[in-house]
Amino acid sequence: MRFMIIIKASADSEAGVMPSQELLTAMGNYNEELVKAGVMLAGEGLHPSSKGARVRFSGEQRSVIDGPFIETKELIAGFWLWKVKSREEAIEWVKRCPNPMPGTEAVIEIRQVFEAEDFGAEFTPELREQEERVWEQAKKN
């Protein structure tokens, strides 16, 4: 099972305040532990929403909204992609994480990633083949 672990933004992360050397060290050690356990597939921090944009879809129309975005509690400051045996295992790993937003209350959200078999019959053999081709090409990039 794959899970996306979402680190929610804080006022500091949205203001572009960079983590301390102490936090970078603690997170580096934690990431190393995740990799050694075969859990971590990917993980990155994100720039503040002031450097981002959203594209709103309304029928065939598209509109671009530049950041920053207001609701800090709904924004993402970083993520991991993990492969674990269960939701409970993901929770146990998150509970071991250093506080990503020292000095404030932090929230880390855990969301399961869809797998091909979750889509049922609508995900035809042709669509599965296309997805495999796309990912193989992506790996080469």
Image (cartoon, rainbow, N blue to C red):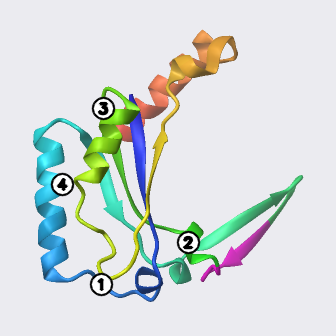
Mark 2 or mark 3: whose residue is earlier in sequence: 2
* Location of residue 85 in the rendering, given as x and y in whole percent from the top left corner: 31, 26
Sequence-wise, the earlier of marks 4 and 3 is 4
**Does residue 134 sit above or below 82 in this rendering?**
above
| Picture disc at residue 31 | 4
Residue ID for mark 3:
84
Measuring from the top left, give residue 94's x and y in whole percent.
30, 50
According to the picture, the residue beneath numbered tag 1 turns out to be 18
Question: Which amino acid type corresponds to the residue marked 4 in the rendered image?
Answer: Asn
Q: What element carries label 4?
A: helix
Residue 104 coordinates in the image, percent (x, y): 38, 80
Rendered residue at 28%/52% (across/down): 95
Given residues 55 and 37, the one toward you in this image is 37
**Visible residue check, residue 83:** no
Mark 1 residue element: loop
Instruction: For the residues labelled 3 and 1, say whether their Cβ atoms are less than 8 Å apart.
Output: no
Tell me: residue 50, above or below residue 138: below
| Label 4, residues with CA under 10 Å away: few <14, some 14-19, many ≥20 | some
Which element type, helix, strand or loop, lies under badge 3?
loop
Q: Residue at x 63, y 76 (%)?
A: 71
Give the magenta-colored segment's residue range.
63-70
Is label 1 in contact with label 4 (beta carbons under 8 Å)? no
Badge number at residue 73? 2
Q: Which of 128 and 76 is in front in this view?
A: 76
